[in-house]
Structures are given as C-alpha cells and as structure tokens.
Amino acid sequence: MGEGEEGGFLIREFGVEGEEMYTFSWSQFNQGENYEGSSDLINLEYHMGPVLASAINLYIIWYGQWNPTHQATIRDFLDSLSSSSSVPYPSVADWWDTVRLYTDQTGSNITATISISGEFYDSGYSHGVYLSRLSMQSIIKAAVTSHSRPLPLNPHNGLYLVLTSQDVQVEDFCRAVCGFHYFTFPILVGVTVPYAWVGYSGTQCPGVDGMISVIAHELAEVSSNPLINAWYAGEDPTAPTEIADLCLGLYGSGGGGGYMGKVYKDAWGNGYNVHGVKGRRFLVQWVWNPVKRRCFGPNALD
C-alpha cells in the first residue's frame, strides 16, 4: 500500500480542550526543521505521566458506511503492529519497536501487544454526519452503552479508535484536521480512557492509504502520551509536540525540507516502507527515536 511519489504531510494544530489535530496535504513545503538528523533542535522531555505499558485492547468504532475492502486494509495494518514472525523486514512491528523505546517512571516500555478486542458498527450515524471534535466522546459513550453488541468500557487497558467514513464531515476536517488523540471525560463517558479519531478522507484528501499513516501517527502518540502528561516537547501541555509531530513528512533516509526520503516502490510505482501481514505493504511516517535522537524507521539506510 502506498501514497505515490510525494509524501503526505501532517500539519499540526490545536483545538478545544487541547486536542491534537492534523491536516494531510500532498503538496511539498519547506520545513527544514524536519530533516532526519536535526537532533539539536529537539527538547523532548518526560513529564512523569503514564504510557500504555500494558497489552492494549483496541476497540474500533466504525462510524458511518464503510467499504469492506478499506476496513480489511485497516485491520491488517493494526494486526501487523504485533506481528513480526513471518513478515519480511522491515515490518510494521519493526516500526513499532521505535515507539516501544519510550518508558514510564517505573522503567516499563510501551507494550508490544496491540489486539483488536472489539468492533462496533455505528452505521446509523447516531450523531449525524456533521460532527464536532467533542462528538467523538459521545460516539464512544453510545458504543459502550448500546443495546446491541456494545463495546466493553475498559479503563484498565482499553484504547478506543473512532474511524469516520468518507461521507462524515468533522469540524475542520481536511482543512485543519484528519485525526487527533485525547482522553475521555468521566462526566461524558463515565471513566477516563484514551482514544483517537481518524477520518476517512475520501475525495477531500488522500484515501485509505494516507489514512493508515495518520492512524499510525495517532497510535504512536496516544501510547506515549495518553493523558497529555508523558512524552512531549514544549512548555505547554495543552499544545504538546509529540513523538510523531517531530517527524512530519519523513518516511525514509535523507528526508526533510519537503522530501519524504528514500522508500521502496512496488510494481505499480507506489511508495512503501514497511511490510505487513497477508503480504501488505504500507507507507508509514517515521517517529522520533529517543536513543538515536533523530527521526527513524526500520527502512533507514544507516
């Protein structure tokens, strides 16, 4: 699975409640601070909060009408995060190994185990087709209180992933947001659980291939900063620069300044940099490696 010649770029902004958002753009732009070796510019710090160190039970909420083929692609990517055996190197699981370098104050690393533990189909658009960012918490609430096959409300090791279909419009979608992560408010959902939202961009932005990289971005950051008090750069916890933000637009060695870096090409010329289950190939942005102090992915040439 690939995104073609040019890299998709995620432009970070913040909205209500400090929620983190990204625009996916095909255009190249000058962002020289994103060169893969720009470690002198980075002041990533640990702020003593938790990371997702326990095995993650991932609950997917499919909001709207979804193409089964696109759902299968997304499931295969998520299954690839914990599947390294029988998958060629570099794999999605090898990519996740960089995320796993982050620890909490006890020294526990982010988990290597992410399991799809439940799926909920909100095909009736319970909150309509025009959503605010805060609507995501209400959608989670509806999924865990549904009379028909509800998701469990798991405050121990649950992570909720809300995916909206291409006909759903979210506040600032594809103008200032294609995804964000945050945590639920007990007054709305009943407990505090981490969650992420990613929209299917359809004709507005890159499609399901580009969506995969946004999902990867959000999972890396919600795992390393689930309550917005763990790993980030900057002085303002309501506007943190997180481990994937530091590597926007980077997918391979030599990347930076609008160049995505060196990636592989399949027979159709589509770019990819990691392998997944069932012979899948994905193009996933790099994340900040705290040991090497630079952006890194398993397809790196050095």
Image: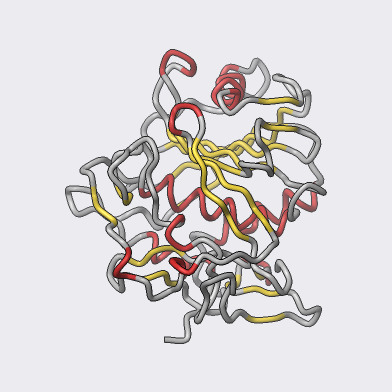
Give left or right: position of 52 versus 47: right
**Identity of the residue furthest to the bottom in this view:** 302
Tell me if residue 223 comes above or below residue 81 in the rendering. above
Residue 1 visible in the picture: no
Which residue is the extreme one toward the left?
A: 106
Q: Residue at x 70, y 61 (%)?
A: 26
Residue drawn at x 63%, y 44% as measured from the top left: 178
Q: Position of residue 270 (x, y in %)?
A: 74, 74
Q: Quadrant of the N terminus?
A: bottom right
The reply, left or right, for residue 168 in relation to residue 177 is right
Q: Nearer the viewer, residue 61 or 254?
A: 254
In this picture, is 46 found above or below 141?
Answer: below
Is residue 64 found left or right of 177 in the rendered image? right
Q: How is the image coloured?
A: secondary structure
* Numbered label tally: 0
Picture coordinates of residue 87, whole percent (x, y): 57, 74
Identify whether 127 is placed above or below 106. above
Position of 138 relative to 240 (above/below):
above
**At 44% from the left edge and 63% from the top edge, which residue is drawn?**
287
- Residue 227 vs residue 43, the one in the foreground: 43
190 with respect to 205 (left or right) = left
| Quadrant in which residue 243 is drawn | bottom left
- Which quarter of the rendering shows the C terminus? bottom left
Q: Position of residue 84 (x, y in %)?
A: 49, 69
